[in-house]
Image (cartoon, grey):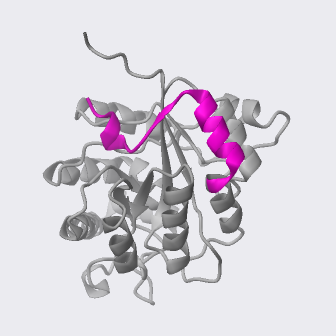
Amino acid sequence: MTPVAPRKRLVVTSDDFGLSTEVNEAVERAHRDGILTAASLMVSAPGAADAVARARALPSLRVGLHLVMVEAWPTLPASDLPDLVDDAGLLRADQAKLGLDLALKGSARRQLEAEIRAQFEAFRATGLPLDHVNAHKHFHVHPIIAGMVLGIGRDYGMRAIRVPRESREALRRAEPGAKTGLALDTAPWAALLRARARRAGLLTPDGVLGLAWSGAMTPARVAGLLRHLPDGLTELYLHPATGGGFPGEAPGYAYADELAALVAPESRAALSASGAASGGFSDFLR
């Protein structure tokens, strides 16, 4: 008899793994002592080598690639990416204009394709199994970038990808009366990404939690989301760190609160009560 899959499946991810020692320490603690099951690695960030060393010592932590195409450190030399970097040699922060440049400039597209491939190569060089792929600022929903990621990822064994679509109903149930504001409105592009990814045979979550409250995932909010976890495969992502003040820190993010949410007894209790199976994306592949 074929075993019946749990109705609820959950991947709890930390983004920005490798950004700093403070982030890496939080990932390790949240996995050892809390509900964190996965982390997304920035392969060229200042703390990347430390993150890889910690991941190798935590074989149950599922690690994926956090593609960086804006506001961070490129993998290729800045001189190879004149259309993509700023005067400091960092990837540009003007995401909307960069998206337009990709549509209009073949040179920008060729440079970005080379950079994406270099990041996949750098992940492969770690020797870590590739659990999933997503992108900083969810830039992979851009249709041109999505095509690059899907095509290049196939060459590197990509089997799962984040599709950032969040249910407002889930947020309202978790925190009745809360003004959630506008999450990154990627719905049309995310729907297209999901269709393309599933045609390519990739696993995608049925829903993602963490967009509207990005940087503000308090213990109460995480416990509320877990108490109202929908059926299907859900990804819950956070940005934990043991402290602030590091390069690349996002202004206003409550890093310590997000770490607290991952290790809080109420979060562990809510996950247990939900009956959800938790793990990385690779644990739910058929």
Up-down: is 155 above or below 41?
above
Question: Is residue 7 shown left or right of residue 68?
Answer: right
Residue 257 image-quadrant placement: bottom right
Residue 101 image-quadrant placement: bottom left
For the residue pair 239 and 79, the one nearer the viewer reads as: 239
Magenta region includes residue 265: yes
Residue extending furthest toward the right: 177
Up-down: is 225 above or below 109?
above
- Return the x and y of residue 156 as percentages of the image width and height: 17, 54
The answer to whether any part of residue 43 appears in the image is no
- Return the x and y of residue 194 as percentages of the image width and height: 38, 34
What residue sits 34% from the left and 56% below the top? 64
Up-down: is 86 above or below 156?
below
Quarter of the image with the C terminus is: top left
What residue sits 55% from the left and 49% below the top? 35
For the residue pair 161 and 219, the one nearer the viewer reads as: 219
- Return the x and y of residue 92 as percentages of the image width and height: 46, 75
Residue extending furthest toward the bottom: 88
Quarter of the image with the N terminus is: top left
Q: Which residues are magenta?
A: 263-286
Magenta region includes residue 67: no
What residue sits 38% from the left and 71% below the top? 54
